[in-house]
C-alpha cells in the first residue's frame, strides 16, 4: 500500500476500532479542531498523496492549518467542553503509594460516573514530574459517587496529572492538573536526545524521527540480554504498545497507539519531546523513556 493510503486506512481504523482518533487529534495536532481528526487527516493525506511531505508550502495545507491554528493541545487545561478535572488535594507528601483522588465534573457540575471504555479502561491516569522523571501510567478505580482513586509514587517537586478518558455523553479528551509534592526538589538535568532506553535488562530502541506538523513513524525494537524479542511483545490494553509524548516546554500531551508496532506520531511544533513507551513482555508491563527533538517540519 502507498503511504498515504496506509495512513488514511490507519486513521480510519483506529477511529473505528478504538475511538482514539479524537484523542490524538486533540492532543497536539495542528489539525485538532471541531472536525474529527480522522476526517482531517484522511483529507490531508488524500489531498497530498505525497509521502515525502516535502511540499509544505502547498496552499491547501497551509490554509487548513491556519484555520485550526488556535486549537489547544491536550493536557494543558483542567477544563474543556464543560468537563473539569479536580484533584482531591493539590498538595501531597512524597511516598511510593500516595493515594491520589480526583473527580471529573460534567457540564451539569456533578461528577461523571458514566465513561466509555477506551483501550480496555474507562480512564487512563498519567502522572509525571515536571522535569520528565517519575512517569506512571495507571488505571484508577471509580467509586459510585464519581471519585477516582489510585496509589501513585511521588517524589518532591511539581507534578502533572493527566486524565485521559471519554465521558459516555461527550468526546474523548485529556485534562491536566498540577500536583505539588512537598520536600527537597532537585530537578533532573535535561536529558540529551536518546532513542535507546534500558529498563530491567531490556534495551528498547526507537527507529524513526519526529517532525513538526508531519506524521512520522516511530518503531520500537526490543532486545533482552542481546536477544531480539520485538516479535514476542504482547498486547497490552488492546495494542502492542502505548506511547505518550510530552512536549518538554509545557508538557502538552499526545497519546499514540500503533498499527502493529508502527506509531504514527504527529507533533505540532519543533522542539524536544519526552516519549514514554509502555510495552509488555512475559506478562510484565515496562516503560521505556526516550527523548527526541522534532525538526522544523514546515520550516524545511
Ligand atoms: Cu491506560
Image: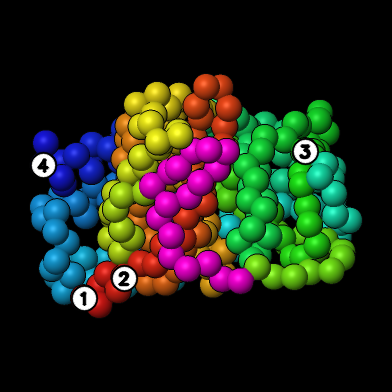
- Residue 239 pos. (x, y %): 43, 30
Distance from Cα at disc 1 to Cα at disc 2: 8 Å
Which of the two labelled residues, at mark 4 and mark 1, occupies the earlier sequence position? 4
Which residue is drawn at the image coordinates 15% and 45% (left, top)? Answer: 3
Image quarter in which the N terminus is found = top left
Residue at image point 64% right, 58% down:
133
Q: Which residue is mark 4?
A: 2
Q: Are marks 1 and 2 in contact (CB under 8 Å)?
A: yes
Which residue is located at x 78 percent, y 52 percent?
Answer: 154
Instruction: Provide the secondary structure element on which disc 2 rests.
Output: loop
* Outermost residue toward the bottom in this view: 299
Count the labels in the image: 4
Residue bearing mark 3? 150
User: What span is colored magenta in the figure?
Assistant: 189-205
245 on left or right of 2:
right
Q: Which residue is mark 2?
A: 295
The colour scheme used here is rainbow
The residues bearing labels 3 and 4 have C-alpha atoms spaced at a distance of 44 Å
Mark 4 or 2: the one toward you: 2
- Which quarter of the picture shows residue 93? bottom right
Q: Is residue 178 above or below residue 46?
A: below
Amino acid at each position: 500500500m502507498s503511504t498515504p493510503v496506509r495512513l488514511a486506512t490507519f486513521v480510519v481504523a483506529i477511529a473505528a476500532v478504538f475511538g482514539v482518533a479524537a484523542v490524538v487529534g486533540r492532543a497536539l495536532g495542528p489539525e485538532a479542531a471541531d472536525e474529527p481528526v480522522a476526517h482531517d487527516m484522511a483529507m490531508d493525506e488524500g489531498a497530498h498523496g505525497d509521502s515525502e511531505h516535502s511540499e509544505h508550502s502547498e496552499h491547501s495545507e497551509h490554509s487548513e492549518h491556519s484555520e485550526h491554528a488556535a486549537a489547544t493541545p491536550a493536557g494543558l487545561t483542567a477544563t474543556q467542553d464543560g468537563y473539569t478535572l479536580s484533584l482531591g488535594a493539590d498538595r501531597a507528601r512524597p511516598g511510593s503509594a500516595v493515594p491520589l483522588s480526583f473527580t471529573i465534573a460534567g457540564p451539569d457540575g456533578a461528577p461523571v460516573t458514566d465513561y466509555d471504555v477506551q483501550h480496555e479502561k474507562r480512564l487512563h491516569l498519567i502522572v509525571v514530574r515536571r522535569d520528565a522523571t517519575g512517569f506512571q501510567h495507571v488505571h484508577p478505580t471509580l467509586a459510585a459517587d464519581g471519585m477516582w482513586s489510585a496509589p501513585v509514587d511521588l517524589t518532591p517537586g511539581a507534578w502533572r496529572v493527566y486524565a485521559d478518558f471519554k465521558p459516555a455523553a461527550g468526546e474523548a479528551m485529556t485534562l491536566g492538573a498540577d500536583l505539588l509534592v512537598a520536600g527537597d526538589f532537585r530537578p533532573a538535568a535535561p536529558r540529551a536526545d536518546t532513542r535507546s532506553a534500558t529498563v530491567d535488562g531490556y534495551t528498547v530502541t526507537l527507529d524513526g524521527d519526529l517532525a513538526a506538523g508531519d506524521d512520522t513513524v516511530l518503531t520500537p525494537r526490543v532486545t533482552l540480554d542481546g536477544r531480539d524479542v520485538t516479535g514476542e511483545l504482547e498486547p497490552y490494553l488492546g495494542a502492542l504498545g502505548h506511547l505518550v509524548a510530552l512536549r518538554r516546554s509545557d508538557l502538552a500531551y499526545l497519546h499514540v497507539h500503533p498499527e502493529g508496532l508502527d506509531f504514527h506520531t504527529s507533533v505540532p511544533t519543533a522542539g524536544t519531546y519526552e516519549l514514554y513507551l509502555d510495552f509488555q513482555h512475559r506478562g510484565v508491563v515496562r516503560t521505556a523513556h526516550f527523548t527526541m527533538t522534532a525538526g522544523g517540519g514546515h520550516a524545511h
